[in-house]
Image (cartoon, rainbow, N blue to C red):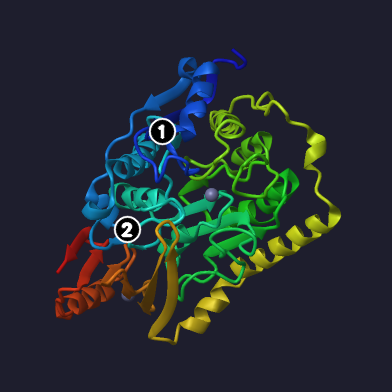
Amino acid sequence: MHYMPIAKRSTGLVLFPAFDWCISPTHPEREERLLYTKDQLIEEGLEDVHNIHFYNPELAEYHDIDRVHFCVPSSRNLLTESHLISAGGAIRAARSVMNKEVERAFAVVRPPGHHAMQTVFGDRGFCIVNIEAIMVEYIRKHYGVRKIAIVDTDCHHGDGTQDIFWNDPDTLFISVHQDGRTLYPGSGFVHEAGGPSAPGYTINLPLPPSTSEEGFDMAMERVILPLLEEFQPEIIINSAGQDNHYTDPITNMNFTAQGYARLNRMLNPHICVLEGGYSIEGALPYTNLGIILAMADMDTSNVREPDYDPANFVQPPEMNAHIEEVCRQARQVFDDRERMRREQAAKEVVRERKSIFYDTTGFGVEETKSYHLCRECPGYMELTGYGLGTHVHGYSIPFNSCPACQQKARDAFARAEKKSDTVTALQDRARDIYETK
Ligand SMILES: [Zn+2]
Ligand SMILES: [Zn+2]
């Protein structure tokens, strides 16, 4: 046993390796992804640590999925049991914290979710449904929490989470990731700052390839921590992707288990949800352990990869200068949020078009979101989309909408024509109802 067997902070763990689900046997997001992690946690004796509690995941309900997504043709049609358990694992982690069974919790589950957008026609970036978003709206529905911060530290831009919370000023979404010019999904630039009702509440920190501990420390100290301090969320969630690791086979960063542990200590999230991380033997067992020990407020100094050498992780000065500039610009976006909101205030409807590519099977969806703005609330959203021969026509009522906007959206849905080639849906988060026709 390398560690003192008492956690200073009680921590819950939900482990769901999904041994029977994968996209294909040789895919990086495959069955054995969490096997070594599981072995490592057992080897380190975490099951015997006082104040660390293991929970079994539950099945999320289709209702929990529909509260967040418009699935085409339907959530029942697109999801496997593994997806319901992965989302249910995140929900179980959230409940353990919200019910005060533990102070912190980590859902070490797969398949991941942060590339899943509000509309879902299939899977993209190894994700079908967005498990953090499902968890966030579950927390809001069941515990009445309003202000939530999601900090996505996966190496890939959290484009799905960004899409879902784009127009929500009560969710501060911060994604720190490898620059989209050099990695999937090719987005996540500083100017992507949020919808017309929530400008400045989406913050992107694109870091150059080979960014190491120094760069992540800088992003934390200069942007993420000060913004959280100002935003004052009731809950902080970490989309804890671990593919920034120097051994990850599908990315180009230079981050370490020590770096992940320190990041977690600084961020101090209430709930972590595993996202990516494809270095199954070289990284995940160490990064996951580092995160768990940091959450439990235990010693992390011994968490090191077998080949760890600090000399390999020094950043050149020009890289530091570049990251400083990214931090300055991101900070500016947040500081400008009131001014940007005032610029939008006079408008009634703002339309945004998007082409969404589903990379796993290779098809595109064209989508238009119309934000019906309001001075009292974020307003309601109407969307139309087309892909794979099917249309979607949806209305989404946010949880924080005013009664007048709720009624307008319900009336518009009632008037919408029923068509055989179209999924016409109302996602009413205020009443917690999902209806289709
Ligand atoms: Zn990733
Ligand atoms: Zn309103």
Front-most of residues 224 and 16 = 16
Q: Mark 2 vs mark 1: give the one in front.
A: 1
In the image, taking residue 204 as reference, residue 208 lies left or right, namely right
Q: Which residue is mark 1?
A: 17
Q: Amino acid at mark 1?
A: Pro
Seen at 65% across and 34% down, the residue is 257
Seen at 56% across and 56% down, the residue is 175
Where in the figure is residue 55, as x and y percent of width and height?
A: 36, 28
Q: Which residue is mark 2?
A: 68
Q: Is residue 266 visible?
A: yes
The image shows residue 3, relative to residue 296, as above or below, that is: above
Seen at 15% across and 80% down, the residue is 417
Q: Which of the 4 quarters of the picture holds residue 345?
A: bottom left
| The N terminus, quarter of image | top right
Q: Secondary structure at mark 2?
A: loop
Front-most of residues 21 and 12 = 21
Where in the figure is residue 129, as x and y percent of width and height?
A: 36, 53
Q: Which of the 4 quarters of the picture holds residue 422?
A: bottom left
